[in-house]
């Protein structure tokens, strides 16, 4: 299992339903907020942004912008396409950051950071860990 919460979101969903500021529940029940457009393309020497540029001259003139960009899509290393844009993801942050332990004898509260990863997106309860129990916190 991966060590960070993630889940598939189609490009069309990012533009409409699960766009900037939307809350998305991914695999494992972890709730995330999709980050802003400034985090979509982090400058990297291997990133080829020209692949994501859309041109519409008349609309560009009306809105006074140089171009439009579509969200990146994820491509793993198993694809045969020759491109620099592999393993691109959209940044998302854990929300809410408060978690509680569902164990009826514990019920501990814990505030994590918005970038906490945990194991497969789950954060282990430290109070239960002291009692040699394995319980995961719930958002």
Image: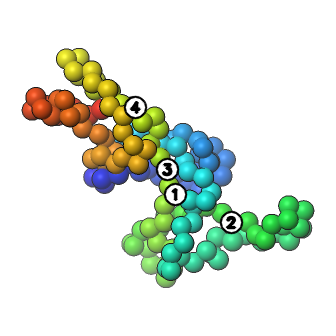
- Please indicate whether residue 134 sits to the left or right of residue 78 in the image: left
In percent of width and height, residue 131 lies at: 10, 29
Asked whether residue 27 appears in the rendered view, the answer is no
Relative placement, left or right, of 93 versus 122 is right
Sequence-first disc among 1 and 2? 2
Identify the residue at horizontal 44%, vertical 50% (top origin): 7
Q: Which mark is drawn over residue 132?
A: none
Residue 71 visible to an observer of this rendering: yes
Contact, mark 2 vs mark 3 (Cβ under 8 Å): no
- What separation in Å lies between label 2 and label 3 (alpha carbons)? 19 Å
Check disc 4 and report the residue beneath it. Answer: 98
Residue in the foreground of this view, choosing between 33 and 17: 33
Asked which quadrant contains residue 50, the reply is bottom right
Outermost residue toward the bottom?
Answer: 82
Label 3 to label 4: alpha-carbon separation: 16 Å
Report helix, strand or loop for mark 4.
strand
Separation of disc 1 and disc 2 at Cα?
14 Å
Residue at the spot 31% in from the left edge and 41% down from the top edge:
122
Above or below: residue 71 compared with residue 86: above
Quarter the C terminus occupies: top left
Q: Position of residue 113 (x, y in %)?
A: 39, 43
Which numbered disc flags the more N-terminal residue, 2 or 3?
2
Whichever of labels 3 and 4 marks the residue nearer the N terminus, that label is 3
Marks 3 and 4 close (CB-CB < 8 Å): no
- Asked whether disc 4 touches disc 1, contact meaning CB atoms under 8 Å apart, the reply is no
Residue underneath mark 3: 92
Badge 2 is on which residue?
Answer: 69
Residue 15 in percent (x, y) is at 66, 52
Give the residue number, with chain letter if any, for mark 1.
Answer: 90
Which of the two discs, 4 and 2, labels the residue nearer the N terminus? 2
Q: Nearer the viewer, residue 58 or 10?
A: 58
Badge 4 density bin: few <14, some 14–19, many ≥20, Cα 10 Å: some
């Amino acid at each position: 299992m991966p060590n960070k919460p993630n889940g598939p979101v189609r490009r069309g969903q990012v533009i409409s339903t699960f766009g900037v500021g939307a809350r998305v529940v991914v695999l494992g029940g972890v709730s995330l907020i999709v980050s802003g457009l400034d985090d979509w393309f982090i400058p990297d020497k291997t990133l080829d942004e020209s692949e994501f540029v859309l041109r519409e001259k008349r609309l560009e003139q009306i809105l006074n912008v140089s171009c439009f960009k579509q969200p990146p899509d994820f491509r793993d290393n198993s694809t045969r396409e020759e491109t620099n844009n592999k393993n691109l993801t959209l940044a998302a942050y854990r929300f809410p950051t408060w978690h509680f332990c569902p164990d009826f004898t514990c019920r501990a509260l814990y505030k994590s950071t918005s970038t906490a990863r945990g194991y497969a997106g789950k954060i282990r309860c430290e109070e239960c860990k002291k009692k040699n129990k394995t319980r995961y916190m719930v958002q």
